[in-house]
Amino acid sequence: MTKILTPTSEHDIAAHDGLWVSPVDAERVTGWILKPEGMCRADLCVPLPAAALAPNEVDLRAFWTKLGGPVVASETQDVWALGAPPEERNAALEGLEAPDFTLPDLDGVPRSLSQLRGRKVFLATWASW
Amino acid sequence: MVVAVAQESRGAEHARPWIEQAKTSYWQLIDTDHRLEDLYNLVNVPQAIWIDEQGRIARPPETAGSTDHFRRMNLATRTMSAEDQAERLVARQAYLDAVRAWVTTGAHALPADEARAGLPKVTPDIAEARARFRLGLWLRANGRAAEGDLQMAEASRLHPVSWSLWRQAADLDEVGKASGPDFWKRVQALGDRPYYPPAKL
């Protein structure tokens, strides 16, 4: 099994030769669905080069790189991290809609920014270090 | 509503003493993966984002009231001059007053174009740094500290202006290291550049 980390999730996937995975697993990890037009999410499709496709397999690394997202791996390539494409982050911020997130409080209760819609929010970071 | 988010890869128990001592009624959240820094392109703590009732960013990420006076502290005694301490408190109070004014009157909220202009851009290097930091954290948490540290070092090399990436990695290596001699060397290397760029209120 290969471990794949995304900014918000963690998956154990059968992958070989880098990140060749089944279309079902590609969708589980990225939310993008393989269609004849390419990899699709909502109305948007990103065409894939022929070299990134095989019968019932897709090269996730090639797809993610095409999206502009970083793909990094551990030394033995048993753990991978797919980062958010910078243009996706920039577009989200430039739209000025505060990106939503869900994080636990001290007791492990998940809290989402979107629960506070209707109130002003002073969102601040801190650290013990 | 205040939402305070601990960028704390050692986990909730490590942040608990501070949170319990603060005795706050607002949300105190734990962000072991520094997800907020990824989403909002943050580089240091404390940074704040002001978000209005419609969920829109009213002020982009900026230093939340801290100042650079600490850079002049006496490192042997870890103390600041009385004057610096006073100036520091004045600056912090001015920032908190601005937050309160915004809450009651809407003052200091920026027009959309100004808020947008104040957003730092996520570059490919920053995006890769975030992915390497995430990978490094996972490796560390799974018994592969040396390999994880290499990923984190590479993250800091790719995104050198992020104090959080460097200091969190240092803290994971050893508690206290984030404000040890290597930290001060990095601060001194800033020269005339700010450690805490002041909020432009």
Image (spheres, coloured by chain):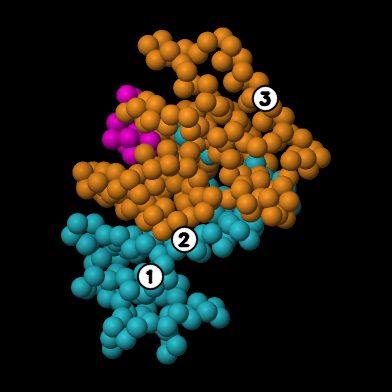
Residue at image mark 1: A64
Would residue B27 be counted in the magenta stretch?
no
Query: Which is more N-terminal, label 2 or label 1?
Result: 1
Q: Which chain is cyan?
A: A
Above or below: residue B44 compared with residue A28:
above
Disc 1 crowd, CA 10 A, few/some/many (<14, 14-19, 20+): some
Q: Quadrant of the C terminus of chain B?
A: top right
Q: Residue at x 33, y 74 (%)?
A: A62
Q: Residue flagged by tag 3: what amino acid is it?
A: Gln
Q: Residue at x 41, y 75 (%)?
A: A27
Give the colour chain B carries in the figure: orange
Residue at image mark 2: A86
Q: Provide the residue span drawn in magenta.
A: B167-181
Q: Which one is nearer the viewer's eye here, B35 or A107?
A: B35
**Is residue B150 among what the camera can see?**
yes
Badge number at residue B93 = 3
Q: Residue flagged by tag 2: what amino acid is it?
A: Pro
Taking the view exactly as shown, the residue that stands out farthest to the right is B105
Q: Chain of mark 1?
A: A
In the image, is B169 to the left or to the right of B87? left
Q: Quadrant of the N terminus of chain B?
A: top right
- Residue B79 drawn at (x, y percent): 47, 12
Q: Chain of mark 2?
A: A
